[in-house]
Amino acid sequence: MTAGPLELGSHTYGKQRIHLVALPEAGRAPDGARDATIRANPGTDKPVELAAEVMLTGGFETSYLHGDNRSVVTTDSLVRLVFLAVERLLPAPVEAVAAAIVSELHERYRFVPGVTVDLSARTWCPLDAGGSYGPRPRAFWRGGEDRQQARAVLRDGRTRVHSGIGGLHLLATTGSSFEGFFVDDLTTSPPVADRPLYGIVDAEWTAVPDATAWEDQRAAVRAAILESFESVSSRSVQQLVAAMCGAVLTGVPAVDDVSVTFESLPLTGAVSGSPGSPRHPETPSRSGSPGSSGLASPTGRVVGYAMADHPRGVTTASMRRSETAVATGTAAGALPAGHTEDGRAEHAHTEGRSR
């Protein structure tokens, strides 16, 4: 069989893991000048740690096929552009910064048909345990706050901005079960009527493009996810993730669609021997720690190992407003958990055994 002509398919290149720390300019100024700078630029008094990724898509056939690099933008140029945009625009919301980077890339390199910019930011917290620095801290720590995330995508000359949060660590001591699942000769997971649940939540959504409301929308989405996690008694992580999506669409009218990912961190009971000993993880019980022969804890506290290096279940669900919901003003989350209408929800998919 004679091979026909070959055609290059999709192709993308760029720069990942662009890591920046934006320092407070006022921190190097005398106290009076520093205070004036902070008053004139609210939000510039704390360091911001950023991670960026810039990918260029399409338009480089001659380089891939013939080694002609005249249309190839160096990745160092991409890093420099991100650096200058961050320096110029912070403390603007990450959505605004990501969109500005895409816009400048498009203006500079018109021959590039597609651009994707992912940007995440984490604000550092003042470290002033003794209170000696008052309103002008000089030291900071990277607290446990979730990341502010944004993705700006240029396709066919139009830019679409997605908002997000990442790294939101959640822990519930009760109110989660996992029973009635499919069982065969490979199944090792026991049914659990009540268990602690520990995981990391990432969420991404698109909303009404209003640059002045991005931070308010992010706060409202975070609040909806937290309220759902606290109040919903779920029979599976799948049901919990769908409930989180519904809570966002119900509570934040500006959001058009949302995707939530829950990365489960297994909690194994305290057992005799080292936490890495080869034995099947057990679920902590209310009467005592597994491996203790049923001996109740004198304090009533259950201690478990967080298996950070253990294979993790990943559960993701996306949900959007159906045309019917938009027409009637009813949010997708108004349906009971586990019930959907055509076009209402894209059900959870799992990798590994998410529970």
Image (cartoon, grey):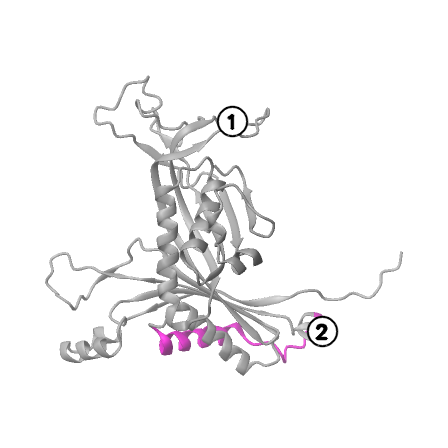
The quadrant in which residue 86 appears is: bottom left
State the residue at coordinates (58%, 48%): 341
- Name the front one of labels 2 and 1: 1
Where 145 sits versus 350, above or below?
below
Residue 199 x/y as whole percent: 40, 43
Residue 177 x/y as whole percent: 43, 32
Question: Do we see residue 277 in this rendering?
Answer: no
Q: Which residue is mark 2?
A: 66
Taken as a whole, is the magenta stretch helix, strand or loop? helix
State the residue at coordinates (47%, 73%): 99
Q: Residues within 10 Å of mark 1 (few under 14, many from 20)?
A: few
Which amino acid does the dot numbered 1 rest on? Thr
Residue 186 horizontal side relative to residue 236, left or right: right
Residue 25 horizontal side relative to residue 307, left or right: left
Question: Do we see residue 198 in this rendering?
Answer: yes
Residue extending farthest to the top is: 293
Residue 185 x/y as whole percent: 59, 24
Residue 145 among magenta residues: no
Q: Which residue is mark 1?
A: 188
Span shown in magenta: 65-90
Disc 2/disc 1 C-alpha distance (Å): 54 Å
Which amino acid does the dot numbered 2 rest on? His
Residue 98 x/y as whole percent: 45, 71
Q: Residues within 10 Å of mark 2 (few under 14, many from 20)?
A: few
Residue extending farthest to the front is: 328
- Under tag 2, what secondary structure? helix
State the residue at coordinates (42%, 71%): 210
**251 or 158, which lies in front?**
251
- Under tag 1, what secondary structure? loop
Earlier residue among tags 2 and 1: 2
The quadrant in which residue 70 appears is: bottom right
Residue 86 among magenta residues: yes
